[in-house]
Image (cartoon, rainbow, N blue to C red):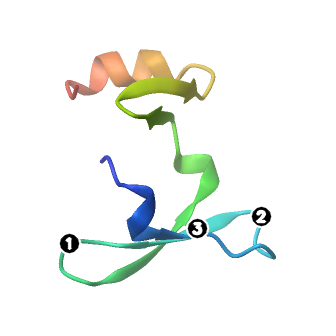
């Protein structure tokens, strides 16, 4: 799933999760360790070690 930063909220006291508002307006708490790829302006800027192997086998692009 790709989300834009304007749909997210980072609590400066919580180093483990961030809040996400989905398209229906529902709020979700996402653990940071679940992030595998980070893009900026459409360019991959960061990826978790071994994230590429999961990304290739998941069938999503």
Q: In which quarter of the image is residue 56?
A: top left
Look at 34% across and 54% down and name the residue there.
3
Residue 22, position as x, y percentages in the image: 28, 72
Q: Quadrant of the C terminus?
A: top left
Closer to the camera in the image, 9 or 26: 9
Residue visible at 46% across and 35% down in the picture: 40
Whole-number angstrom distance, CA of label 2 to CA of label 3: 8 Å
CA separation, marks 3 and 1? 16 Å
| Vertical order, 60 against 16 (above or below) | above
Task: Tell me if 18 is positioned left or right of 16 in this view.
Answer: left
Q: Is residue 35 left or right of residue 10?
A: left
Count of marks overlaid on the render = 3
Residue 9: x, y in percent?
54, 73
Instruction: Between label 2 and label 1, give the one nearer the viewer.
Output: 1
Q: Is mark 2 on a helix, strand or loop?
A: loop
Q: Mark 2 points at which residue?
A: 15
Residue 40 left/right relative to 55? right
Taking the spot 77% from the left edge, 73% from the top edge, the residue there is: 12
Disc 3 residue crowd, few under 14, some 14–19, many 20+, Cα 10 Å: some
Name the residue nearer the viewer: 40 or 19: 40
What residue sits right under mark 1 in the picture? 23
The kind of secondary structure element at disc 3 is strand
Cα separation, mark 2 vs mark 1, equals 25 Å
Instruction: Judge whether 18 appears above or below 45 on screen.
Output: below
Query: Are discs 3 and 1 less than 8 Å apart at CB?
Result: no
Which sits earlier in the primary sequence, circle 3 or circle 1? 3
Helix, strand or loop at disc 1? loop
Residue visible at 69% across and 76% down in the picture? 11
Residue carrying label 3: 18
Which of 34/2 is in front? Answer: 2
């Amino acid at each position: 799933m790709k989300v834009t930063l304007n749909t997210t909220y980072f609590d400066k006291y919580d180093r483990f999760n961030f809040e996400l508002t989905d398209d229906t307006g529902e709020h979700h708490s996402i653990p940071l360790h679940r992030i595998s790829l980070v893009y900026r302006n459409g360019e991959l800027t960061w990826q978790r070690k071994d994230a590429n192997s999961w990304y290739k086998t998941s069938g999503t692009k």
